[in-house]
Amino acid sequence: MSTSIVDSSLGSGRTNLADRIELRRFVGRELLLWLWFESELFDATLSTKEHGSFGLWVEGRLVLDEGKESTTIKGTAPGMHREAKEALLRGKMPERAGLHLAFGDHDCKLTLRGETLAFAGLVPPKKKTEAEEPVLDAPPPPRRKKKAEEAPVDAAHETFYERMYYARDVEGLVMALYRDFLALRLSPVWDSHVVPALEAWVAGEEVDVDRYRAARDRVVARAGKRS
């Protein structure tokens, strides 16, 4: 790409992106942009005080819009598509994003909406069952009918509570990320480090990862001490 093309398209693109960051009413869209940015900058490995390091990357479906015009990109890594960055340069912001999370013993996919911070499509992974050993002894006598009827009910209750606890853990991780995002968003580091790094990333330019990480971590650490 020639210098003149970069300069001409990036001039308005950078202004639009900075304006969106400053003027968007719903900070949830900025959260999605930030998560997308950090997932690529840090090779899909993020961290919070409570969870340590974990995996997070954009996967499945990414929707960006500006008013009535929207762009939808699907794939295993939709954020890596050229069309995604071009949409940002045109002033669009993420409206929803499919995320893949891997933390602790959890591994899941979900869709996070920017304007409401609500997530959907969260389904716990199927349990791995051990292979059944061959039965050598005679089978046990048939169970009473009442017990047989109660078994499916108990299993349904167990599944329900497992999904509740699973959703609670995922929500806790998302809220921890949101807290760190707000600490950055409300600090001077947002304008001095985050916005320039975002602009360079969108433009396909090199980002000083170490400089960004150092500034980011200082803000998040200070916020963690106050909480």
Image (cartoon, grey):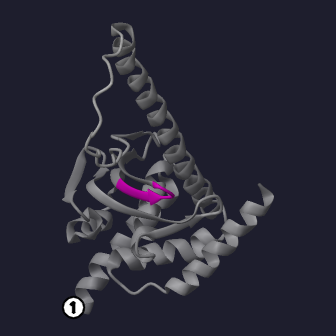
Q: Where the N terminus falls, by quadrant?
A: bottom left
Which amino acid, by three-letter code, is at mark 1?
A: Ser
Q: Position of residue 144 (x, y in %)?
A: 36, 10
Q: In this view, does 169 lie to the left or right of 226?
A: left
Q: Where is residue 132 in the image (x, y as percent from the top left)?
A: 29, 44
Where does the magenta region start and end?
99-105
Judge by depth and name the residue closer to the eye, 170 or 118: 170
- Secondary structure beneath disc 1? loop
- The extreme bottom residue here reads 3
Q: Quadrant of residue 59?
A: bottom left
Q: Quadrant of residue 99?
A: bottom left
- Looking at the image, which residue is at 44% across and 39% down? 118
Q: Quadrant of residue 64?
A: bottom left
Does the magenta run of residues contain 84? no
- What is the total number of numbered labels drawn onto the structure image? 1
- Looking at the image, which residue is at 65% across and 62% down? 49
Label 1 sits on residue: 2
Judge by depth and name the residue closer to the eye, 164 or 216: 164
Q: Where the C terminus falls, by quadrant?
A: bottom right
- The extreme top residue here reads 146
- Neighbourhood count class around disc 1 (C-alpha, 10 Å): few under 14, some 14–19, many 20 upward: few
Please, is residue 210 above or below residue 51 in the view? below
Assign the magenta stretch its main secondary structure: strand
Judge by depth and name the residue closer to the eye, 80 or 160: 160
Q: In this view, does 27 lie to the left or right of 179?
A: left
Judge by depth and name the residue closer to the eye, 99 or 72: 99
Q: Is residue 14 left or right of residue 1?
A: right
- Looking at the image, which residue is at 58% across and 71% down? 191
Q: Where is residue 110 in the image (x, y as percent from the top left)?
A: 36, 47
- Looking at the image, which residue is at 26% across and 91% down? 3
Does the magenta run of residues contain 102? yes
- The extreme front residue here reads 137
